Image (spheres, coloured by chain):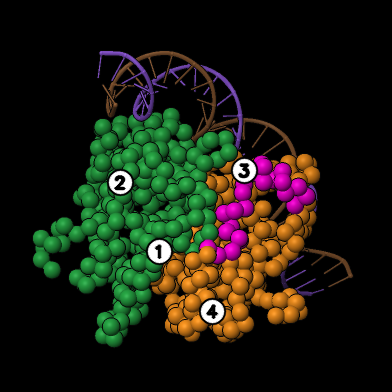
Chain colours: A green, B orange, C purple, D brown
Amino acid sequence: MTNAAKSVRSPAASRLSHFLNLPARDLNALADLTKVMRRFRAHTEIVAEGDAPRWAFILLDGMACRFRTMSDGRRQILTFIIPGDICGLQSLALKRMDHSIATIVPTSIAVIKRKLLLEAMMQHPRINAALWWSASQDEAIQREHVVALGRRNAHARVAYLLCELVWRYAAAGIGDGRAIRLLMTQSDIADALGLTPVHVNRVIQDFRKERLIVLNRHELRLLDIDRLMDIADLNPAYLHLGGAPAEVEQECARGDVSG
Amino acid sequence: MTNAAKSVRSPAASRLSHFLNLPARDLNALADLTKVMRRFRAHTEIVAEGDAPRWAFILLDGMACRFRTMSDGRRQILTFIIPGDICGLQSLALKRMDHSIATIVPTSIAVIKRKLLLEAMMQHPRINAALWWSASQDEAIQREHVVALGRRNAHARVAYLLCELVWRYAAAGIGDGRAIRLLMTQSDIADALGLTPVHVNRVIQDFRKERLIVLNRHELRLLDIDRLMDIADLNPAYLHLGGAPAEVEQECARGDVSG
DNA sequence: CGATCTGTTGATATCCTTCAATTTTGGTGG
DNA sequence: CCACCAAAATTGAAGGATATCAACAGATCG
């Protein structure tokens, strides 16, 4: 593959390549899954709590979030979904959604029918392994979220979220690992971190005064990642970007020979 | 299957049967996975953060928890592991553990080697589907945990945890859905709920005064589940105990014919 | 270019933590 | 089976982090 070809690699391919090197054959199979596109306006529910999960999707552009609404109307955002994220693999094993998914800005997704997805996983061991890893990473991200809400104060929570977003965008091939477009509002951040919008704002002010970040018109730049990681007591290892275990590599290699 | 046979069903079989009806053939395959047993004393680390995941396990008896330790020594419990829980399926796709697992009381587990597990999933579509569901349920439990820490106050958090434990034990065939042995300490509960042991204690006192629970020498009984659910703003649907989606049933039925 | 959403700031309230001490429980060895 | 010891549970008092309420400024978008 040429460098030019690599540079146009999709966010999903970029993300999965942190786990396994995907040969052209697998990249094509992955691209074949993303033929059916849908666009949504900002603040639109893609999947509603109680729905029967029928399809999975890859977010191509924009931003969405999983969330739950409490009976008094308050919202807990479970995770932000960014380009390259693969959603709904696990949900296909469930009868009903226990949470909703909505867009935050105008967003386009590639819809993947259940049957097509399962076939691709059966026929392409590498795709199968990579999707499995992707689901495992999602779980790890959820765990870190629990740690953040359970044991980090407001400053640490905001620092954690900003670092995670910048790192996840970088893994998807977007940004340089220091700056991104922060598409959501401070109120969204509050809903993700279990804080009030007012308090999130005060923390951000503090970070600006301390020259830890620049945030202007939704352009975020982390000026001192080391100190932010320190404030959050955060270790990026939980994102599992260091490649696949040896066993997985071997199994895929065997698949190549026999396939 | 006779009622007598059902009554001795393992916690794991009991749990998975809430998703799919497992014929004797699959139950045997499941039992074959649980030949290699290990026993651990209380407060023993089974898996350490940073380890390479080598095997999965089913908890047979006792209790364990997944947790992360902060750099100042504080602990966040990610989830309690009870009999019938299947652990480490997802982790096999990862190079290193991002958290630890330790026993809370004397505990026995069935160790499942990676290769055996993958073979069983290949050869038994129903086992495959059921394990997939189990992983999906684990994710849903994590999501509810995020909601609890993000949007529930101390009383709601404790009410949520007590209900979840009683329901999960019931799904594993232990208890009547109202009472269980609460094996962990109030300090463990605090570490799971992002509270201090002192405050957990005060909430429990309140619940006792309100005649919502009886808790004596680690024997817990929920006296008014409806009110506890109301306090927690909790809906048991997130445990996904209502069976498999139609597509899964159909796929497994096809597997039966061709297999 | 006005309406509405988002961000910002200040004052006050509250839930939960922290610290400290005491009682109770549970486990262990003699 | 009891004595002893450590761990767990319990209670009280005081402090702090974050929420709540309210008002206004600034940004965004039809």
Q: Where B79 falls versus B41 (above or below)?
A: above
Tell whether position B236 is magenta.
yes
Q: Chain of mark 3?
A: B
Q: Which residues are magenta?
A: B222-245
From the image, state whether disc 3 or disc 4 is nearer to you: 3
Do callouts 2 and 1 point to residues on the same chain? yes
Residue B65: percent from the left, percent from the top?
Answer: 56, 63
Secondary structure category for the residue under label 1: helix
Callout 4: SS: strand
- Residue A218: quarter of image: top left
Instruction: Tell me the tag on residue A114.
Output: 1
Distance, label 2 to label 3, CA atoms, is 34 Å
Q: Residue at x 43, y 69 (%)?
A: B91
What is the three-letter code of the residue carrying label 1?
Arg
> Residue A241's spot in the image, x, y percent?
31, 62
Q: Residue at x 10, y 60 (%)?
A: A4
Dot 1 and dot 4 within a common chain: no
| Quarter of the picture holding the N terminus of chain B | bottom right
The residue under label 2 is: A39
In the foreground, A6 or B249? B249
Observer-nearest of D5 and B250: B250
Per the image, the residue denoted by label 4 is: B111
Of marks 2 and 1, which one's residue comes earlier in the chain?
2
